[in-house]
Amino acid sequence: MSEELNKTKNGYSADNITVLEGLEAVRMRPAMYIGDVNTRGLHHLVYEVVDNSIDEALAGYCTKINVSILEDNSIRVEDNGRGIPVDMHEKEGRSALEVVMTILHAGGKFDKGSYKVSGGLHGVGVSCVNALSTLMKVSVFRDGKEYEQEYSKGIPTYSVREVGDSSKTGTTTQFKPDGSIFTVLEYNYETLCTRLRELAFLNKGLELSITDYRVKNEDGSYLSERFLSEHGLKDFIEYLDGNREKLMPEPIYIEGQKQDIPIEVAMQYNTTFSENIHSYVNNINTHEGGTHLSGFRRGLTRTLKSYADKSGMLEKLKFEITGDDFREGLTAVISVKVQEPQFEGQTKTKLGNNEVMGAVDQIVSELLTNYLEENPKEAKQIVNKVILAATARHAARKARELVQRQTVLGVAGLPGKLADCSDADPQKCELFLVEGDSAGGTAKQGRNREYQAILPLRGKILNVEKAMPHRVLDSEEIKNIYTALGVSIGTAEDSKALNMEKLRYHKVVIMTDADVDGSHIATLILTFFFRYMRELIESGYVYIATPPLYLVKKGKQERYCWTEEERQKYQEEFGESGVSVQRYKGLGEMSETQLWETTMNPESRTFRQVDIENASEADRVFSMLMGDEVPPRREFIEKNATYANIDA
Ligand code: 0RA
């Protein structure tokens, strides 16, 4: 027990007991505080610490934040802010620094009502990160001095001490996540880059950098990147839409303050058919939208509608224009900073504050009206785009009505190619989307027909990124997928609304060959789910099967291998002579028993669950993978391909 915790006569003061109980609670139920104890939670620790530095930047005192991944997967976050105060905290009877680092929700004690707006995972504060770290060290530079304190599992190992003189100001926090809590301890450089890049766009002028001390470049320097955005959300839009054909030379940019709420919006129309709106509150992505998003939609619809009416361009149109039509091919980012945000919804990512709706609506209406008046050429292009969208939607509705009528009349039924399972409980049932009829046949033989259904897909499905919505609905293979699932992919109001309660399988498994074509097909299917059935992914129902690449055999011994390294290892464990290696080029080369054992049997298979860690990045990557530009796609594939070596 540390000296700090033994300073009262009976060993513990009431305050200390509170601290211990707080830390204990976090360690007992970490997932309640940080979401989960897997990769996601591990990375959230970093975001939590960075958020504190972002707050200091929002207060106007910090311009640089640097994140380092150290060799042992410890994390160091440095900022050049004022430094966390180290003086005695009157009420708590200990250093303010120690209070911040050890007491749950301590953040608010300093900054309530002043400037603290940035996110945090659940606003739990850095003390949670501390509680979940075997080691944490904070160095504070202020008042011409350097101070420090260290902790183990959240408990100080010594009182705040002065280290020496220093002319700089700032805070440096270093921590090592606890291996007895987290299932994964390895940090992913790209994941952290994506969040830091996003933060740079959301906080223009703030410099964020990252260095990975585990990886050296060819010139001996460490892998590192620096993110600094001069134009904020405008740059964000350029980044997101880099691979799409734009309708106007520059994004529309709206910035201002209404009712003390800072509001920033950037938007751009492109020639695609999807709507990509990303909304943020205090730098947190509000996946479920909320009042700021509603305000934006209202302002946008009303302003464009009124402009289009006045322009006379709608006169020849024989049907009504709906809100959806104004958002087809629109990429937009909305960011608001709210003092006391109320988060609602299933994942607590829906803004509830009512006052924000009017504020965003007003500012969007005002500034967009100005833009349309000042840029008649762009304005006309937007209205034309809206008319095109309305026309396509009209056609799509007719196609959909036909499908629905067929369903009612029982004409459509389940797709003929579907080998369904016998159990009717969606929770138990799995649907395998299999590349090709031949592999489909093997899978049918190998499966457990009680709860595993097979739908063979003929080669490449339609690239939905490039097709009009009514063509998507009409495409044979896509129709097979959504009718097998039992859901329709749209209603007249919202082309993305799913009737999930009808979903027939709670595991939808993409099973393709382990080669370039196979991953292309998997990407096409994922793109379709992402654009038209996002809820399926968000609910955690989408999986990717991982068939093995090799079978290494010697006599009666057999090993399946999923990587090149595994193959080498087993070839050497088995000894070189008399070893045979079978390379599976496709699912069809496996016997039904092999396919069952390696890829389909719940006892032995490995599925990768698909999730959307970062919606804006997922959106960008899909537009790039499925778009027209070749160089960025090639670069992405070279960086991420697992199969490149064996197909070469
Ligand atoms: C409250 C007050 C003051 C600084 C901070 C918080 C602060 C916290 C963090 C966390 C990471 N980096 C930080 N930098 C600053 C300063 C009050 C003052 O100096 O008057």
Image (spheres, helix red, strand yellow):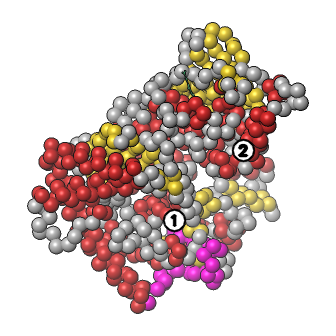
Instruction: Using the rendered image of the protein, determine whether residue 73 is visible from the camera's viewpoint.
Output: no
Residue at 61%, 81% (x, y): give it.
424
Residue at 37%, 81% (x, y): give it.
403
Q: Work out which quarter of the rendered image holds the N terminus and state it.
A: top right
Q: Is residue 418 magenta?
A: yes
Say the numbered circle drawn on residue 26.
2
Q: Mark 1 vs mark 2: give the one in front.
A: 2
Above or below, 546 against 253 in this view is below
Looking at the rendered structure, the secondary structure element under dot 1 is helix
Give the magenta range.
410-435
Residue 212 position in % (x across, y down): 58, 31
Front residue of 92/168: it is 92
Q: Is mark 2 within 8 Å of ligand 1?
A: no
Residue at 33%, 42% (x, y): give it.
258
Residue of label 1: 536
Residue 284 position in % (x across, y down): 49, 45
Q: CA distance from mark 1 to mark 2?
A: 31 Å
